[in-house]
């Protein structure tokens, strides 16, 4: 590249950067429709920014949940129709990626519940995929229009308390089913003993994803922080939460499932103890006979 072209490229790049900064500043000076306190409060309880869904006023997280479910189902259908029939013994890059994703959850299920893991593998794969994709969905910043005409970014489905509780309760019911299948009524008692488990699972998911969303909302709200920092913060919080929460919930579910579904056989009585008892009994009888 000649020196003239190089200078022209630098000048054009500089002008584009200046125009972007001016646009950000102009948009940031405009009056916001809500304060930062209202924005962060609504991110938790969703009273203000609601969306019209076929005549119903719903939380943005419900739209996120439907969108994520549709994306996962569509992606799975495309893989099953167009890619699975072409899978080979020597896998290509995409086949290897799919197989490794399945192996991760299958390994978690087998390592924590080796005696009963077929259904568990299916559940942790489904739950883990939903948590990961649902959390990463927030990173794309999909927009929706509220009932008041404002544009809002769709949050992660599990950043809403209702979605987190639903996931926690579902995981607890799967653990309960494992207890019933493995130990019948005793398995029910073993599962009910951990009655705080759905609460801890739900609030762990909700708290982790909500904290990331609030930090990102705070950074995007202030014009002085909205140049490079939002990209770093948004990506860092979203990716870390997606990986960590996927691993934590699937690991906890597998661990408790394996514990309550494991069959505990009664230990046979020690024959040595029985022989000792018989010897003592014979000795006492012989002493009585001798005295008589």
Image (spheres, grey):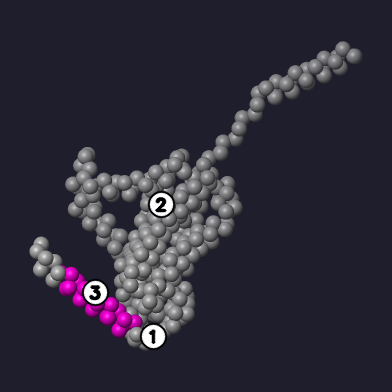
* Image quarter of residue 68: bottom left
Label 2 crowd (10 A; few <14 / some 14-19 / many >=20) = many
Give the prevailing secondary structure in the magenta stretch.
helix
Please give the name of the residue rendered at 46% of the width and 50% of the height, measured from the top-left corner: 251
Q: CA distance from mark 2 to mark 3?
A: 46 Å
> Most extreme residue toward the top, as rendered?
290
Which residue is labeled 3 in the image?
Answer: 17
Q: Which is more toward the observer, 277 or 108? A: 108
Please give the name of the residue rendered at 35% of the width and 74% of the height, measured from the top-left corner: 226
Q: CA distance from mark 1 to mark 3?
A: 27 Å
Which residue is labeled 1 in the image?
Answer: 33
Q: Is residue 129 left or right of residue 199?
A: left
Please give the name of the residue rendered at 26% of the width and 61% of the height, measured from the top-left corner: 74
Residue 26 inside the magenta-drawn segment? yes
Which residue is labeled 2 in the image?
Answer: 124
Label 1 crowd (10 A; few <14 / some 14-19 / many >=20) = few
Ranked by sequence position, the earlier of labels 1 and 3 is 3
73 lies above or below 57: above
Q: Which is more toward the observer, 174 or 148? A: 148
Can residue 17 be seen here? The reply is yes
The picture places residue 3, in percent across and down from the top left corner, at 11, 65
Label 3 crowd (10 A; few <14 / some 14-19 / many >=20) = few
The picture places residue 2, in percent across and down from the top left corner, at 9, 64
Q: CA distance from mark 1 to mark 2?
A: 41 Å
Quadrant assignment for the N terminus = bottom left
Question: Helix, strand or loop at disc 2?
Answer: helix
Chain part drawn in magenta:
9-28
Please give the name of the residue rendered at 37% of the width and 87% of the height, measured from the top-left corner: 31
Can residue 62 be seen here? The reply is no
């Amino acid at each position: 590249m000649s020196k003239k072209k190089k200078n022209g490229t630098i000048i054009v790049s500089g002008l584009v950067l200046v125009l972007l900064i001016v646009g950000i500043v102009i948009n940031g000076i405009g009056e916001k429709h809500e304060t930062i306190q209202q924005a962060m409060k609504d991110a938790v309880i969703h009273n203000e920014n609601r969306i019209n869904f076929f005549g119903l006023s719903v939380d943005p997280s419900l739209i996120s949940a439907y969108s994520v479910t549709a994306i996962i189902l569509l992606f799975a259908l495309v893989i099953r129709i167009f890619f699975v029939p072409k899978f080979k013994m020597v896998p290509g890059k995409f086949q290897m990626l799919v197989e490794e994703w399945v192996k991760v959850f299958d390994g978690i299920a087998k390592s924590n519940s080796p005696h009963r893991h077929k259904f568990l593998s299916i559940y942790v794969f489904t739950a883990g995929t939903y948590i990961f994709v649902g959390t990463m969905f927030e990173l794309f910043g999909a927009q929706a229009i509220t009932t008041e005409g404002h544009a809002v970014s769709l949050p992660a489905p599990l950043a809403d308390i209702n979605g987190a509780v639903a996931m926690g309760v579902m995981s607890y019911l799967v653990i309960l089913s494992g207890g019933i299948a493995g130990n019948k009524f005793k398995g029910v008692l073993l599962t009910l003993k951990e009655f705080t488990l759905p609460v801890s699972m739900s609030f762990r998911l909700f708290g982790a994803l909500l904290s990331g969303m609030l930090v990102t909302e705070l950074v995007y709200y202030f014009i002085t922080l909205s140049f490079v920092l939002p990209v770093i913060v948004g990506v860092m919080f979203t990716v870390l939460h997606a990986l960590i929460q996927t691993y934590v919930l699937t690991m906890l579910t597998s661990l408790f499932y394996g514990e309550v579904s494991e069959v505990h056989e009664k230990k046979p009585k020690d024959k040595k103890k029985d022989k000792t008892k018989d010897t003592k009994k014979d000795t006492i009888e012989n002493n009585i006979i001798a005295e008589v």
